[in-house]
Amino acid sequence: MSEPYEVTQFITEVGTRIRVQRLARTISQADLAQRADISRQTLIAIEAGALSTRFSDVARVLWALDDTSLQAALASAAQDEAYQDAVRSRLPRFKRKSKSDA
């Protein structure tokens, strides 16, 4: 089963933005990968928009680039009305398994 086009497009755009930010800062792939504590092959996959990339690896790259605008855009839960409603209602973050679920 393939991902929806919107998901694929989003991942591709994030990868492109990371590549452009890296090039604008004249940082090599090897140097950025080292700063982000990931392999160069992982960075290549991120920049290519690979769907198999771990979100934590993308986050490491964003922090290594100090790309605060994309960090904020990806972590904008504070701006999400549904999120705010959930926080105000004190919804649990996860449901514990009951003994009958086990």
Image (spheres, helix red, strand yellow):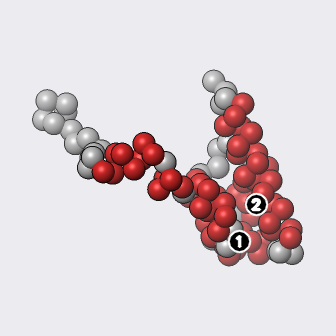
Q: Is residue 35 above or below residue 49?
A: below
Residue denoted by label 2: 18
Residue denoted by label 1: 65
Q: Is residue 41 above or below residue 93?
A: below
Asked if the residues shown at circle 1 and circle 2 are in contact, with their CB atoms under 8 angstroms apart, the answer is: yes
- Tell me the crowding category of disc 2: few under 14, some 14 to 19, or many 20 or more residues within 10 angstroms, Cα based: many
State the image quarter where residue 102 is shown.
top left
Nearest the viewer among 3 and 43 is 3
Residue 66: image x %, image y %?
Answer: 67, 73
- Residue at the location (13% across, 35% down)? 99
Residue 45: image x %, image y %?
Answer: 74, 52
Nearest the viewer among 27 and 34 is 27
Amino acid, disc 2 = Ile
Q: Is residue 95 visible?
A: yes
Q: Is residue 57 visible?
A: no
Nearest the viewer among 54 and 21 is 21
- Residue at the location (86% across, 68% down)? 23
Q: Secondary structure at mark 2?
A: helix
Q: Quadrant of the N terminus?
A: top right
Amino acid, disc 1 = Leu
Q: Is residue 25 above or below residue 82?
A: below
State the image quarter where residue 22 is shown.
bottom right
Report the side of 91 relative to 53 (left or right): left
First in sequence: mark 1 vs mark 2: 2
Residue 40: image x %, image y %?
Answer: 75, 64
- Residue at the location (59% across, 54% down)? 74
Nearest the viewer among 57 and 91 is 91
Q: How many marks?
A: 2
Report the side of 24 relative to 59 (left or right): right
Q: Residue furthest left?
A: 99
Q: Rounded to the nearest whole Å, what is the CA distance between mark 1 and mark 2?
A: 8 Å
- Residue at the location (67% across, 64% down)? 69
